[in-house]
Image (spheres, rainbow, N blue to C red):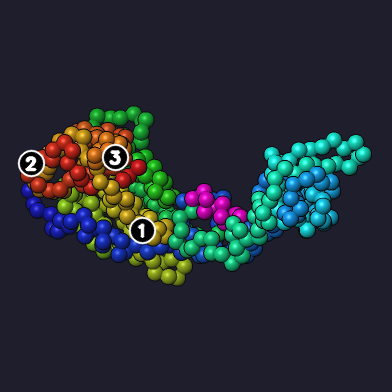
Amino acid sequence: MPESPYEMLPVDDALEIVLAHAEPLPAETISIHDALGMILAEDAVASTPLPPFPASVKDGYAVVAADGPGVYPVIGQITAGQMADFRVESGSVAYITTGAPLPDGADAVIQVEDTEPLSADDGQARVRILSRAAPGQDVRPVGMDVAAGTRVLSAGDLLGPAEIGLLATTGIVNAQVFRRPRVAILSTGDELREPGEKLAPGQIWDSNRATLGAAVRQAGGVSIDLGISGDTQAALEANVHRVLAEADILLTSGGVSMGELDLIKPLLEEAGTVHFGRMRMKPGKPLTFATVPVQEKGCERTRLVFGLPGNPVSSLVTFYLMGVPALRRLAGHFNPRLQRVQAHLAQPLRLDPERPEYHRAALHWDSDLNDGRGGYLAVSTGSQASSRLLSMRTANALLELPQAEGELAVGAVVWALVIG
Ligand code: AMP
Ligand code: MG
């Protein structure tokens, strides 16, 4: 068998190369309601304090703290959203609800639980105040939650529910964020048919497009479906050039190993620069990474192309290892790498003497591990054949098994890359 001309790169070196070619995409302005999971491209500063007025923390009575316990006339009421049109003088109180502005003159709130309403025989409402308040009790002063001028978020922050709420509470409705990467996905192979179509002998349903499309969206990208391309140079070439005009990343699957119909590598050599064509790992050794320069609005930009192996597990694992960090970097993530945790093996695992292996496993928290301090237990998904997509089912981690003879025993501790 002819030897591949491509050097087999360690996975870490391959990832460095990929990240060195990945830059955050230009920022765009979008509604905060569409910004979940995106990365903020500018600081967000509060222009007004929160609360903007001294606000009651309780339902109760606005009082002059120095007055102390006793019976007082209730001279009015203030509910949230209204300003009092009266002053609370010493010797009087006003009914107030949570979030309402404290009226002038008052300097504390007595919660309703510490009061007793009295009957208003003469038409004047009165209340018995039972406790003594310190000045400022149960009042949020102006700017207590957010002082004016506070930087509530920084460029580079990931927008989750709380961060989107902080933008809203600061009055920001449109935010500058890094654009979501557009990722085009093409399956290659004469044997592939659309799922559900009638299969002729020798044909199979294309599962990689469905899998990769979902993985792209899960990682925060926008997936573009390019369908299936046959194994001919012309069909592939037309597809690749068409898509690079509009997609930031192109994922192809299939056609990168050493067979005669493996046309992706030569095509990418032609269109741009192939940075590597093999990785020292399994599953997914023939992963190919290339960059292709394109003109976009008068600027030269670099498109990233991942020629993923065709086997369903290989394509998904290599997408997690290389594609997800690249996508995250384009999307503006400060740390684009997958999270790594330590895990204890639930069963012995045989090692591969030739290549490190990314063994699919389900991590569960087990409170008995580490002498009762707890830790992750890694349960293998079973047979690790690279064609067996069932080995990814329920997997939330890829165990980094070293290249070595023999096996790791039950309880051995390994690094695990979190994928779900
Ligand atoms: P290749 O990398 O093209 O040599 O394909 C390796 C194996 O993966 C072959 O058994 C293919 O039939 C299978 N394969 C390739 N592409 C897909 C796909 N999109 N969906 C499911 N299986 C595929
Ligand atoms: Mg093929």
Distance between mark 3 and mark 1 Cα atoms: 27 Å
Foreground disc of the pair 3, 1: 3
Q: Residue at image x 13%, y 40%?
A: 408
Which amino acid, by three-letter code, is at mark 2? Answer: Gly
Distance between mark 2 and mark 1 Cα atoms: 35 Å
Residue 257 appears left or right of 157? left
Furthest toward the right, the residue is: 122
Q: Position of residue 169 (x, y in %)?
A: 61, 55
Q: Is mark 1 within 8 Å of ligand 1?
A: no
Is residue 281 located in the magenta-colored stretch of the structure? no
Q: Could you say whether the residue bearing mark 1 is in a helix, strand or loop?
A: loop
Magenta span dominant secondary structure = helix
Name the mark on residue 374: 3
Q: Residue at image x 22%, y 57%?
A: 12
Is residue 167 located in the magenta-colored stretch of the structure? yes
Which amino acid, by three-letter code, is at mark 1? Answer: Asn
Q: Position of residue 335 (x, y in %)?
A: 36, 58
Which amino acid, by three-letter code, is at mark 3? Answer: Gly
Name which of mark 2 and mark 3 comes first in the sequence: 3
Q: Residues within 10 Å of mark 2 (few under 14, many from 20)?
A: few
Q: Residues within 10 Å of mark 1 (few under 14, many from 20)?
A: few
Q: Mark 2 near mark 1, Cβ–Cβ under 8 Å?
A: no
Q: Which residues are magenta?
A: 160-173
Q: Residue at image x 79%, y 49%?
A: 93
Name the mark on residue 335: 1
Distance between mark 2 and mark 3 Cα atoms: 28 Å
